[in-house]
Image (tube, grey):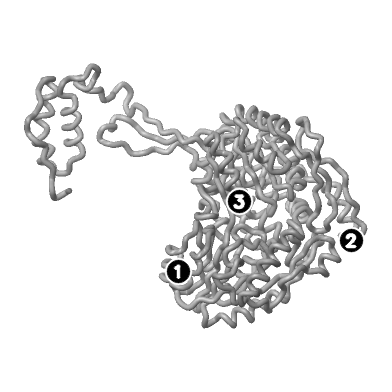
Amino acid sequence: VILIICVVGTITLLFGFPIETFVLDDPKVLTMCKESGSNRDEIMDCDEHVVCDQHQVITDQWMPCSSALFGKRLGFVPEMNKDDVDIRVKAASSAQKTWKSSSFTQRNDVMRALLSFVLQNQRVLCEISSLDTGKTMVDASLGEIITTLEKIRWLIAEGESALRPEKRSTGPLTGLRSASVEFAPLGVIAAISPWNYPFHNLMNPLCAALYSGNALVLKPSEHSSWSTMIYAQALRQVLQSVGAPPDLLVVVTGGAEAGSCVVRHSLVDKVFFTGSTSVGKAVARLAADRLVPVVLELGGKDPFIVFDDADWTLARLLSARGVFQNSGQNCIGIERILVQESIYHRFIQDAKETIDALRVGGEIGSRILDVGAMTMGKKEVERIESLIQDAVQQGARVVCGGKLDSRSCEIYGGCYFQPTLLVDVDLRMRISQEEVFGPIMCVMKFKTEQDAVSIANTCPFGLGSSVLTADSKRADRVIRSLQCGMSNVNDYAVNYLCQSLPFGGTKMSGSDRFAGIEGLRGCCLMKSITRDRIPHVRFNIPNALRYPTSPNAFEISQYINFIIYQPGIMHKFNAFPHLLRMLIQPNYIPHTTLSTSRKHD
């Protein structure tokens, strides 16, 4: 709540009060859920066919979408084929041809309209996400809303300066030239997004694409396509309300084939993929056929390292939020808690007290729930149970939880997993190496600083990390030794609320970055440009180096290199007369040997 107040307050102070925008109406099925009091027995399956634009739907195949909260059908979205994809990518490309020349004033107007839309529709945006993916309202607010607001705030505040032409230095041979890097729109950016935060996973690439002068083609996960379509309907209206082409945002729904068609389309200029490592590899292979650049944000196994001098209350609060936020379904969720042995048992005892108090369930708008549903359903639960069983067989202990929450499943109809505390985990166990993506607190013991680093790095992933200690020098040593793309000292995941920072990892967690200056510029074609520093004043190519070249052209080039780049003024001075004579006498070739300074060698 404090964070939201601070963000809204900062936005108001910097940019004035939000402009008026339309209010997003509750989708039909959401209204039905509210009227039933979230009693799943009174909620009927919905047969509505949902699209987000006016473009023709050619396919006759429609995918059912189910609520992770209740297990009821929310409606149908088209399972688009190659022709459907082609229509939408071409529409986005056409819209971008006008948008690419938009001014930063126009782009800021769009950002302010989007910001106003989010602020004025926070509750219904969270309710839609909750209904589709099963998260609690608080988890939706933290993961969908505040992250999106901060993204927009940063773009309004710093986006223009990030994309303005940037002056670069010149060298001795180019002193009469000015040098700069300019950032031109790429064209059509495709984003293949996961299901865990459908609104933010739409807004994050959309805002970056629009601000850099591009259009976005979004291919959401099948498990969040219903909510994405609802969001996209509204966002296209927001674009239209401020004079931007609505086709700057198009959505492609379907399975793997639809995603493949998007990546392979000749008008797609860059691909952002967020998801599993295995699918990310497949996307990269497809994109390689056209040498289309790909940003891969893949799996994570983030360590949360607690030293014995850490702030105890902070460690307890952050570890719980980092593990159980969105039922553990976070790419930068805490997957491994490494606790120094002197405080190991105390940590387990306090963690158990926290976990025992967590309330599991699914109810629209509920204020008394802590952990929501598993979006992917029973297949995902079976995978997590298998990881726990493997760990127990090798010596780990389940202190609490560890299985399907049958009572919550029966009451609400979705798929719910008990918040779990698994301790005595070691590197032999699959759960220490594979991404869990569930409400499982895995606790490991370490002795020394070097031991903690070794355990943390013995993992195929390298996305984020947290280090809790009162010793700032130790914190610096540890984070510099960790093989990951992001680290937080005495905090968890706060780097993502610093939108000035790039986001991404190493090893099997992916490549390249989004967010920050680097991510925004990654949506652009970077052009290196030189111009006349003073009009009509230029260096000319010496006559000896013009075609046809003179007999001593090589020696002239050699002496120029020596005079410019050889350290030591006397060496330069001794070579200069020979260069001058060669420029005057085309047939003169010095017989002296160029000498270099041993001191500088």
Q: Where's residue 474, x and y in %?
A: 43, 71
Tell me which numbered mark, 1 or 2, is placed earlier along the sequence. Answer: 2
Report the quarter where the N terminus lies.
bottom right
Q: Where's residue 471, x and y in %?
A: 44, 73
Separation of residues labelled 1 and 3 (CA atoms)? 33 Å
Where on the picture, by quarter, is residue 356? bottom right
Separation of residues labelled 1 and 2 (CA atoms)? 49 Å
Please tell me which residue lies in front, 563 or 1. 563
Residue at the left extreme of this rendering: 591
Q: Where's residue 138, x and y in %?
A: 71, 61
Residue at the right extreme of this rendering: 42
Tell me which numbered mark, 1 or 3, is placed earlier along the sequence. Answer: 3
Is 451 rendered above or below residue 113?
below
Tell me which numbered mark, 2 or 3, is placed earlier along the sequence. Answer: 2
Q: Which mark is residue 278?
A: 3
Q: Amino acid at mark 3?
A: Ser
Q: Which mark is residue 39?
A: 2
Q: Which mark is residue 475?
A: 1
Secondary structure of residue under mark 3: helix
Q: Residue at x 79, y 65 (%)?
A: 361
Separation of residues labelled 2 and 3 (CA atoms)? 38 Å
Is 376 rendered above or below residue 403?
above
Q: Amino acid at mark 2?
A: Asn
Secondary structure of residue under mark 1: helix
Where on the picture, by quarter, is residue 379? bottom right
